[in-house]
Image (cartoon, helix red, strand yellow):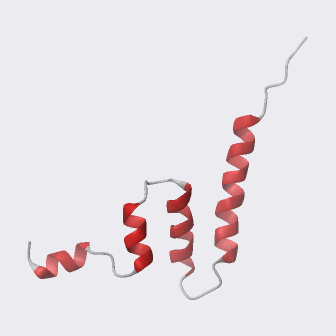
Amino acid sequence: MQPEERDKETPQNNLERLKSHLKKDSLAEKLVSARIGAEGSDPRPALREVVMNRIEELRRGYELPDRKA
């Protein structure tokens, strides 16, 4: 592998390196992606959205279907 090819494949910062080790669509990967997407701005709104979406997924998974008598 040529050095320039390795540079293209190697993530440039710690968050990108971390993301490359995480399972796709996992909560951890979504949080890191949200943080990367925020770049220089405040990451809290993006992180909050990811967490709220996950809470909603969990809530839907535990809801019991209505029983009809």
In this rendering, would 47 be left or right of 19?
Answer: right
Location of residue 13 (image quadrant):
bottom left
Residue situated furthest left in the rendering: 2
Horizontal and vertical percent position of residue 2: 8, 77
Residue at 27% across / 75% down in the picture?
10
Q: Nearer the viewer, residue 69 or 15?
A: 15
Residue sitting nearer the eye, 27 or 34: 27
Q: Is residue 61 left or right of residue 18?
A: right
Q: How many numbered discs, if any?
A: 0
Residue 63 versus residue 15 in the image, above or below: above
**Residue 29 higher or lower than 5, as above or below:** above
Residue 6 horizontal side relative to residue 45, left or right: left
Residue 47, horizontal then vertical, whole percent: 64, 69
Which quarter of the figure is the N terminus placed in?
Answer: bottom left
Foreground pick, 18 / 65: 18
Q: Quadrant of the C terminus?
A: top right
> In the image, is 40 to the left or to the right of 69?
left
Q: Residue at x 51, y 53 (%)?
A: 26
**Residue 9 in picture, x, y percent from top left:** 24, 72
Residue sitting at the far top: 69
At 63% across and 78% down in the image, what residue appears? Answer: 43
